[in-house]
Amino acid sequence: MRITVDIEDESLDELSRITGQDKKSPAVAFAVNEYIKREKAKEFGRLLREGAFDYPATNDEIERGDG
């Protein structure tokens, strides 16, 4: 999908440096995908902390390999 976005030159230059992408579109696409991955990981961590997943084995059992 194509979109038009206004991004300051300095920000785009920094983004290209950070992502290692020489072209603008791949740099922006990479940054968007990484942002999405990080947000999903944060949400998963939040769900883990809140006990949203019910595992039948304890942490000790999992670490020993009996769970």
Image (cartoon, rainbow, N blue to C red):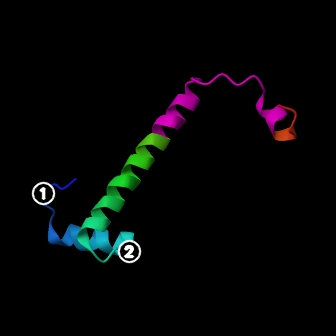
Give residue 10's position: percent from left, percent from top: 19, 72
Instruction: Give the SS element for disc 2.
Output: loop
The residue furthest bottom is 22
Residue type beneath disc 1:
Thr
Circle count: 2
Residue depicted at x 53% and y 37%: 45
Comparing 1 with 4, the one in front is 1
Residue under the image location 52 percent in, 29 percent down: 47
Vertical placement of 13 versus 39: above or below?
Answer: below
Q: Which of marks 2 and 1 is nearer the N terminus?
A: 1
In the rendered image of this protein, does residue 42 appear above or below residue 1? Answer: above
Residue 40 percent across, percent down from the top left:
45, 41
Q: Disc 1 marks which residue?
A: 4
In front: label 2 or label 1: 1
* Residue density around tag 2, few if under 14, some if 14–19, many if 20 or more, within 10 Å: few
**Residue occupying the point 16% across, 71% down:** 9
Q: Is 46 placed left or right of 29 in the picture? A: right
Q: Does the magenta stretch include residue 58?
A: yes
Residue 20: assigned label: 2
Q: Give the range drawn in magenta.
A: 42-62
The kind of residue tagged 2 is Gly
